[in-house]
Image (cartoon, rainbow, N blue to C red):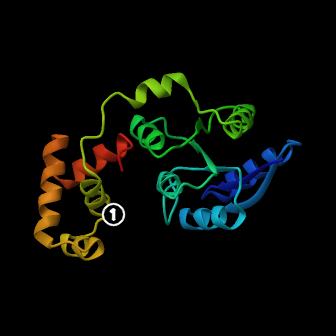
């Protein structure tokens, strides 16, 4: 039996995935979560074979959760299921040790097959998406990305500085560098471009 934790912030999609995966004789959904920190807690509590997670969730993204599990050497393998075919997301997923990447518009059979293959130790990514992942690498550092992510949420420099334990001048420098690297005019354009490419 392959034990699964399922993380998805849309209740209807979460219920549908849980029901469809539960129809398979060799799959068991042992816990569900609607946000990233709860998904991480569920993995730690239930020690599943596979975490199936969305990217965009409150609390922490699926990519954040995957990166933390990878960092701590957790045995649970991660499958990302998302509507986003963005190269930046896929690249970050691969760097975070994600074992499978499936788009939500794929048939449920593809997700089931991916879960089984990932459980068997394989990495499963659509070949076209895998090629796209290495086109147009993210030029930003992790810290520039952190600052830009908060700026994209509308926080002023003073609040970003407090949140990240940085000096306000350092925040300005990170934003300026990110804007320059992305070739845009301001933080709003930088955030929009970075989000469109899956870098935030």
Residue 156 image point, x, y percent: 22, 70
Look at 52% across and 57% down and name the residue there: 65
Q: In this view, does 91 lie above or below 174?
A: above
Q: Give residue 27's position: percent from left, percent from top.
A: 81, 46
Image side of residue 197 versus residue 124, left or right: left
> What is the secondary structure assignment of the residue under circle 1?
loop
Quadrant in the rendering for residue 180: top left
* Displayed quadrant of residue 197: top left
Q: How many labels does the image show?
A: 1
Depth check, front residue: 87 or 41? 41
Left or right of residue 26, residue 196 in this image? left
Where does residue 83 sit, x and y in percent of width and height? 54, 41
Q: Where is residue 92 in the image (x, y as percent from the top left)?
A: 42, 43
Front residue of 11/30: it is 30
Q: Residue at x 27, y 69 (%)?
A: 155
Quadrant in which residue 170 is drawn: bottom left
Residue holding disc 1: 153
């Amino acid at each position: 039996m392959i034990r699964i934790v399922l993380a998805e912030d849309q209740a209807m999609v979460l219920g549908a995935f849980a029901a469809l995966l539960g129809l398979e004789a060799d799959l068991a959904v042992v816990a569900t979560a609607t946000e990233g920190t709860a998904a991480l807690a569920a993995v730690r509590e239930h020690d599943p074979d596979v975490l199936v997670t969305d990217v965009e969730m409150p609390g922490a993204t699926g990519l954040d959760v995957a990166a933390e599990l990878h960092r701590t050497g957790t045995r649970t393998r991660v499958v990302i299921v998302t509507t986003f075919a963005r190269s930046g997301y896929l690249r970050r997923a691969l760097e975070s040790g994600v074992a499978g990447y499936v788009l939500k518009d794929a048939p449920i059979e593809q997700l089931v097959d991916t879960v089984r293959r990932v459980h068997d130790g394989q990495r499963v990514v659509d070949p076209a998406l895998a090629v796209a992942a290495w086109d147009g690498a993210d030029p930003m550092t992790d810290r520039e990305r952190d600052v830009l992510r908060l700026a994209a949420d509308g926080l002023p420099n003073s609040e970003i500085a407090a949140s990240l334990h940085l000096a306000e001048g350092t925040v300005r420098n990170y934003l300026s560098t990110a804007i320059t690297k992305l070739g845009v005019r301001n933080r709003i354009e930088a955030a929009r471009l970075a989000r469109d490419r899956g870098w935030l």
